[in-house]
Amino acid sequence: MATTPNAATPADLPANPPSSLRRWMGADEIAHVVTLIAAATLLLIAVLLVYQLWVLSGEARSKFGWTFFLTKTWDPVAGDFGALPFIYGTLVTSLVSLLIAVPLGVGGAIFLAELAPPKLSSSLTFVSDLLAAVPSVIYGLLGVFLLVPLMRTTFQPALKKTLGFLPLFQGPAYGIGFLTAGMVLAVMVVPFVLSVSREVLLAVPRDQREAALALGATKWESTWRVVVPAARIGIFGSVFLALARALGETMAVTMVIGNNPKISASLFSPGYSIAAVLANEFSEATGNLYLSALIELGLVLFLLTFVLNGLARLLIVVTTKRGSGVLPT
Amino acid sequence: MRIVKVVSLLAVLLAIASLTIAAEGQVLLNAAGATFPYPIYSKWFDIYHQSHSNVQINYQSIGSGGGIRQLLDKTVDFGASDGPMSDDQLKQATVPILHFPTVLGAAIPSYNVSGVQGDLNFTPEALAGIFLGKVTKWNDPAIASVNVGVKLPSDDIVVVHRSDGSGTSYIWTDYLSKVSSEWQQKVGKGTSVNWPVGLGGKGNEGVSALIQQTPGSLGYVELIYAIQNHLPYGKVKNSSGAFVKADLASVSAAAAAFSKFMPDDFRVSITNPEGNKDAYPISSFTWLLIPSKFTDTAKRDVVKDFLKWMMTDGQQYTEALSYAKLPKEVVSKEMKAIAQIQ
């Protein structure tokens, strides 16, 4: 719609409502309101979520108090509930998955962004994005039917033979357990690390690479000492995205973790995660206390995610300060 | 053009009006609950709808616990559960809730033992010992003594149980509680329990996948799932001393053995029945949970008519879906109980 120059005069305003409306409420204001609503909605959802979890878990909170975090029993029949084995299982599986996924994902991203020919880079990125879109139940099924037998017959005996002196790799090899769950999770979160890391590496200005090369750095030196440190914050961000996904993953984990609320130093032994026990027991939970304890577990998972995210931000702040302005030598 | 528009608008309005008029005789019932009987319930509701086109019953198979909760919250017209409601739960209801057994289910021991073909025999003591973690080897005398002639390996037994809350776990633990006082004290019965040993698989498919993949494993699976997937499973010794393999007949026999002692509210566990050597000991009813008072008389009449139809004509569809039928004595007792719905 073309506005005439004289539309701006006050006399014309009533006669020309569309343009006056535009004047009165410009695109800036509209954008401001719309984006504010979007942001406020997100905040509102988060607040409502915590509020509901808090209210509905009231019975379990008042009965168990802080001991909920320290008790190892989970006995629906006796009405005795503790979150410790589930917190442990959630943390261990997420940690194992990150230990595998971060080197793979960041390494892959460096190759795709810096070293690979562009054609190969874009097609491999496409494949990685496809992996991120596979439903988690598919990963769970592949875990049960491919990875579990392989773990039991090959990987776990081999680990026992070579690293069996560590308590991490002892005990009977069932094929399922913390290690297998962590490995399935790793496959699921690698695409997140890879995609995001590659984008931030590509976003590092060309000047920086060229400056490093001009100073006599090799290709690898420029990548490792200039580009990667510059993209550090974005890479951290990709890792936290992966961690969030790993913490909350339900279906794939419950299929391979063994679903046994035990705390064991061995990665071979079966365990349980918060998201998995919620998915397993929520639909058949009959008693009020039982239901309330499950909801409190949901609250614990929320809290855990919150704390880990906070720590992650702190880590970024600390490392950024230390590294700012000075390139690592 | 304008006239055409007005006429077409009128036609649409008329169509909507006639639809709402036609819908006035419609009765829409919402129900929710157990997943185990879902195939037969959806078949029943579908066939009943074919002969009573004004009746539509929506059933959400969200699990027994969810069904009971929704019934107590009055978000559904009736519920369904694999375990009877507890006294506490019944007290929470604003109108008394009636239990109506519909079909029977059973849990069977399935296993994967190297070198063993054919059916293994299990005593109640052996099953309780294995699930308590006391019987740990396949060649333990508790198993070997009732499987003479079978060469049992010295492998460790890997126990597999359901990880999701389920009616099948309820039947299994209810049975173990009856045959082992130690189990009753340490673990008890429920849709989810604190298992002393073992690995958890999600759903019947999760448990059977674990059993198939893990040499030396033993777990329990719903009978229908085992029949439909041709899983090998063992015989269990009943209280008359006979080793019985679960099938539709031996499960119905267990219900018949209990029909003499059937309480008026039908809340009865039929595991480990006495006095019938053909009865399979690890089976259970599954129930519809019906409020005894409906404020909507049209809904009340439909529910009563449906229950009658289910007990009579509806029974012919059960065995095609591998559900064990209710014994005649139970059906006639239920027909009388329908009158309690007001």
Image (tube, coloured by chain):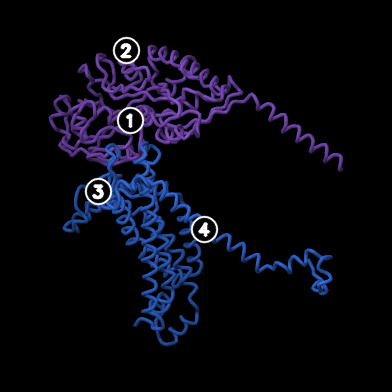
Chain colours: A blue, B purple
In the figure, residue B213 lies in which quadrant?
Answer: top left
Q: CA distance from mark 1 to mark 3?
A: 35 Å
Q: Residues within 10 Å of mark 3 (few under 14, many from 20)?
A: some
Find the residue positioned furthest to the bottom. Answer: A215
Q: CA distance from mark 1 to mark 4?
A: 49 Å
Q: Position of residue A283 (x, y in %)?
A: 40, 39
Asked if marks 1 and 4 fall on the same chain, the answer is: no
What amino acid type is highlighted by mark number 3?
A: Lys
Observer-nearest of B264 and B37: B264
- Evaluate if marks 4 and 2 touch, with contact meaning CB atoms under 8 Å apart: no
Q: Is residue A207 left or right of residue B185?
A: right
Answer with mark 2 or mark 1, whichever residue precedes in sequence.
1
Mark 2 lies on residue: B260
Number of dots carrying numbers = 4
Mark 1 chain: B
Asked if marks 3 and 2 fall on the same chain, the answer is: no
Find numbered disc 3 in the image and state the secondary structure of the residue it sits on. Answer: loop
The mark found on residue A72 in the picture is: 3
Mark 1 vs mark 3: give the one in front.
3
Mark 1 lies on residue: B231
Q: CA distance from mark 2 to mark 1?
A: 33 Å
Answer with mark 3 or mark 4, whichever residue precedes in sequence.
4
- Evaluate if marks 2 and 1 touch, with contact meaning CB atoms under 8 Å apart: no
Q: Is residue A65 left or right of residue B68?
A: left
What amino acid type is highlighted by mark number 4?
A: Leu
What amino acid type is highlighted by mark number 2?
A: Lys
Find numbered disc 2 in the image and state the secondary structure of the residue it sits on. Answer: loop
Q: CA distance from mark 4 to mark 2?
A: 60 Å
The mark found on residue A42 in the picture is: 4
